[in-house]
């Protein structure tokens, strides 16, 4: 998520997002905390997917969250 915020253009290239298209990432932890944008987007087709993820937290405990990826032109 920090790479998305600090290096959007570089991450866009790494993820092979076509030029002329934009994308965003949004992560929501099980406790309700979220990282990323939850903005309105242009009136165009938006492709979106949501993934439930399990991960190891900083304190080495199992945790869960939801990652949403959207792309639009």
Image (cartoon, rainbow, N blue to C red):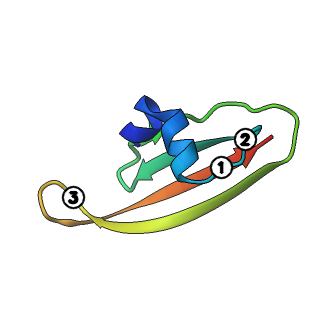
Of labels 1 and 3, the one closer to you: 1
Relative to 53, residue 15 above or below: above
- Crowding at dot 1, Cα within 10 Å, few <14 / some 14-19 / many 20+, comes out as some
Relative to 15, residue 73 above or below: above
26 and 17: which is toward the camera: 17
7 and 59: which is toward the camera: 7
Of labels 2 and 3, the one closer to you: 2
Distance (Cα) linking label 2 and label 1 = 7 Å
Distance (Cα) linking label 1 and label 3 = 29 Å
- Crowding at dot 3, Cα within 10 Å, few <14 / some 14-19 / many 20+, comes out as few
44 left or right of 12 in image: right
Image coordinates of residue 45 in percent, x first then y, are 86, 46
Which SS class for mark 1? loop
Tell me which numbered mark, 1 or 3, is placed earlier along the sequence.
Answer: 1
Q: Quadrant of the C terminus?
A: top right
Tell me which numbered mark, 2 or 3, is placed earlier along the sequence.
Answer: 2
In this figure, which residue is indicated by the disc labeled 2? 19
Quarter of the rendering containing residue 20: top right
Residue 57's label in the rendered image is: 3
């Amino acid at each position: 998520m920090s790479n998305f915020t600090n290096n959007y253009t570089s991450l866009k290239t790494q993820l092979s997002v076509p030029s002329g298209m934009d994308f965003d990432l949004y992560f929501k932890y099980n406790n309700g905390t979220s990282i990323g944008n939850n903005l309105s987007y242009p009136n165009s087709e938006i492709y979106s997917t949501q993934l439930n993820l399990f991960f190891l937290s900083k304190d080495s405990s199992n945790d869960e969250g939801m990652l949403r990826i959207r792309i639009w032109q």
